[in-house]
């Protein structure tokens, strides 16, 4: 008997059509890309430059947040912050005509439980993504680690009919990609593809700016930069501040860290790439060939 609760069963059993395809569609323009992060803004920081490119190429974007983001503030209480961050996440996703979904688990309390796994299985089956992009399981934040664990634990079960029997199973496991990180233990991140996002960086920062409570308040407070945040009516100043905040994150280092891969991908143009996103194929998902990965990211 599935432990999935009635709310999620109702939410994700609305679509009853059979999942007839037996492998993810990595070549079609209208493929579905699902980004799964522990918190609102996780996906935007790590992978939404590439998601923007995929959206522009015709892909459907689904951004999933496992937690409600209600812990990350220095003055707002959980209830008000959860509502605010939900609205911000939906606003950010709208910039890529995307669907924003939250499992609503309390921030800081994500666990790889059977009940949470069933919720994620139901969600993934309902949206039938071709590609899932998420973080690796070695990470400083427990919510991040357990989000990755939930994705891993759900991956094979997506095809098992007697697990969450109220939701039709997929006949394939999506391609699962990990977005880049700086952690070295137990295993260092090793990308299969590195993508320049210089041409969409302004749009990525725009998506991030919609997470106002996070980038202009919480992270600014954590980084001891709160006093230098421009007022809300100074859009140019805020975007400049956001760029400085972004450059303090590991993503900003990827272009130098993976310069040989950028040169292999873009030739001499790879020398001038400033901002990049990197992805590693997970062993838990569909095992794409080098040719299939090339087609997935063709033109990016």
Image (cartoon, rainbow, N blue to C red):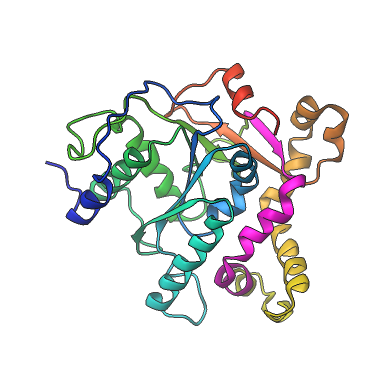
Instruction: Indicate the quadrant containing the N terminus: top left, top right, bottom left or bottom right.
Output: top left
Q: Is residue 298 left or right of residue 131?
A: right
Quarter-of-image position of residue 189: top right
| Residue 182, visible in the rendered structure | no
Residue 11 in the image: state x and y as whole percent: 26, 52
- Look at the image and say whether residue 209 sits in the magenta stretch: yes
Task: Out of 219 and 48, give the one closest to the viewer.
Answer: 48
Residue 139 in the image: state x and y as whole percent: 51, 49
Q: Find the magenta span and give its range.
A: 192-218
Quarter-of-image position of residue 13: top left
- Look at the image and say whether residue 116 sits in the magenta stretch: no
Q: Is residue 229 above or below residue 183?
A: below
Residue drawn at x 51%, y 50% is 98
Instruction: Indicate the quadrant containing the C terminus: top left, top right, bottom left or bottom right.
Output: top right
Majority secondary structure of the magenta segment?
A: helix
Q: Is residue 160 left or right of residue 36?
A: left
| Residue 130, visible in the rendered structure | yes
């Amino acid at each position: 008997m599935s432990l999935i609760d009635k709310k999620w069963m109702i939410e994700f059993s609305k679509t009853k059509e059979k999942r007839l395809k037996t492998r993810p569609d990595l070549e079609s323009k209208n493929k579905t890309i699902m980004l799964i992060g522990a918190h609102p803004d996780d996906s935007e920081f790590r992978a939404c430059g590439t998601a923007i490119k995929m959206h522009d190429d015709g892909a459907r974007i689904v951004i999933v947040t496992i937690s409600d983001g209600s812990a990350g503030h220095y003055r707002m209480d959980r209830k008000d912050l959860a509502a605010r961050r939900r609205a911000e996440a939906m606003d950010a996703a709208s910039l890529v005509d995307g669907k924003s979904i939250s499992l609503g688990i309390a921030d800081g309390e994500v666990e790889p439980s059977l009940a949470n796994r069933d919720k994620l299985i139901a969600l993934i089956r309902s949206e039938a993504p071709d590609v899932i992009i998420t973080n690796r399981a070695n990470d400083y934040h427990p919510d991040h680690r357990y989000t990755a664990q939930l994705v891993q634990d759900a991956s094979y079960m997506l095809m098992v009919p007697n697990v969450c029997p109220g939701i039709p199973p997929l006949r394939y496991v999506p391609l699962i990609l990990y977005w880049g990180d700086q952690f070295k233990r137990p295993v260092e991140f090793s990308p299969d593809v590195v993508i320049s996002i210089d041409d969409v960086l302004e749009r990525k920062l725009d998506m991030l700016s919609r997470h106002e409570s996070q980038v202009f308040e919480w992270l600014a407070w954590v980084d001891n930069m709160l006093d230098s945040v421009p007022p809300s009516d100074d859009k140019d100043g805020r975007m400049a501040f956001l760029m400085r905040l972004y450059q303090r994150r590991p993503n900003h280092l990827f272009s130098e860290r993976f310069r040989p891969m950028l040169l292999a991908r873009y030739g001499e143009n790879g020398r001038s790439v400033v901002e990049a996103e990197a992805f590693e194929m997970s062993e838990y998902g569909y095992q794409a060939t080098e040719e299939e990965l090339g087609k997935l990211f063709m033109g990016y």
